Image (cartoon, rainbow, N blue to C red):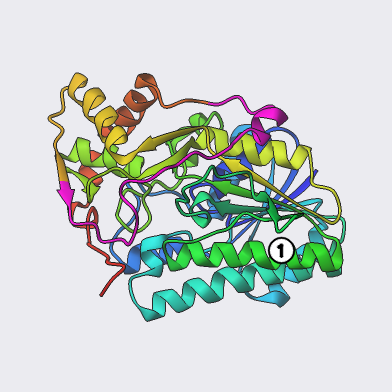
Amino acid sequence: MKVLILGADGYLGWPTCMYFSRRGHEVMGVDNYFRRGAAVELDCEPLFPTPNLIRRAEIWEKLSRRTIEVRIGDATDYGFLNRAFEDFRPEVVVHYAEQPSAPYSMVNRDKAALTLTNNLLSTLNIIHAVHESSPDCHIIKLGTMGEYGTPNIDIEEGWLEIEHKGRKDKFLFPRQASSLYHTTKIQDTDLLWFYVRTWGISVTDLMQGPVYGLSTEEANLDESLMPNFNYDEIFGTVLNRFIVQAVAGHPLTIYGRGGQIRGYINLKDTLQCVYLSALNPARRGELRIFNQVTETFSVNELAEKVTRVGEKLGYSVRSNYLPNPRIEKEEHYYNPTYTGLLELGLEPHYLTHETLSEMFQVVEKYKDNINMSAIYRGVKWHK
């Protein structure tokens, strides 16, 4: 396949480029280096430096004998994006080109505006580029389980059948986001659903839970190919943050009572899910939705796992229950369905003692790079 990956320099984007390339597909990666710039601006750079996207593609080609074409530019620039589509003519486009952080979207008005503009305009531009230049191209958009919120009913995979006053119909599952970032992801889904109905495009929307992990088979070829690993409050996901905090001797930052339950997924499984979605595309005129998680945990359960493994490795791990800066339920029902990707062939990597130990060992190697002031900034949802 010819696979266009937008947001190719990111935590998920670069591993996805290598994953498809290694399996013989023709890959173009596009990025505007937003996260690199934002991390510098906010003094919360990743745990270890990584080469820029052009340089990483060169290293990958030298080691793998496979090429990844790179273009540096912004998906909100329609002229740039449409030229990439016209030149490459992708069969699949993977849409990671969004501002990916809930805390970033809540810092202030300017960060909120950037999130809103970037996320919705990039999605709209992709839809129009597909329609104009590659009408048979399958769009794979990374959504988020955060779109659903924490309803007091089971979370189905994107759709819900309703019976009302003796009549039945099928609707997108009700969604109630807990941040502006998550709200833009809901609006992405609505945009895609509108154009699926109007233009008959083909879309898979992957409702992903928080991702954790550092290693992939491809990145193990050379440490310069490792993903950008953020551990700060703004861009770091919760388990990645906890591992770094444990190694640094910083108390684990648990918000509120720690009862918040979410669905989690290993980075390796994100790659599997995107790949399986590409190999088994949605039909024309279909919005297909998968819940992309493999296990559910509360924040307290994650903290307990990190504490147990950390102590076995010789770390003294403590927890600190902080006033919750977010507006969210801390005790709630949470039961998502996530069978669709398993049926396509997903082979999950679960959160084992060995997985956590491997993460500790990598973080330990770079512990002198940890910026303690980036771990907790206290970005509040309520002012």
Residue 78 versus residue 322 in the image, above or below:
below
Image coordinates of residue 353 in percent, x first then y, are 34, 20
Q: Amino acid at mark 1?
A: Leu
Residue 257 versus residue 179 in the image, above or below:
above
Number of other residues with Cα within 10 Å of mark 1, as a class: few under 14, some 14 to 19, many 20 or more:
many
Instruction: Inspect the magenta stretch and tell me whether residue 104 lies in it.
Output: no
Q: Main secondary structure of the magenta part?
A: loop
Residue that badge 1 annotates:
192
Q: Which residues are magenta?
A: 321-348
Q: How many marks?
A: 1
SS state under label 1: helix
Image coordinates of residue 32 in percent, x first then y, are 55, 66
| Residue 269 placement, left or right of 166 | left
User: Which residue sits at x=59%, y=33%?
Assistant: 63
Instruction: Inspect the magenta stretch and tell me whether residue 328 lies in it.
Output: yes
The quadrant where residue 326 appears = bottom left
Q: Is residue 72 visible?
A: no
Residue 220 versus residue 76 in the image, above or below:
above
The quadrant where residue 274 appears = top right
Q: Where, quadrant-wise, is the N terminus in this rendering?
A: top right
Query: Residue extending furthest front?
Result: 165
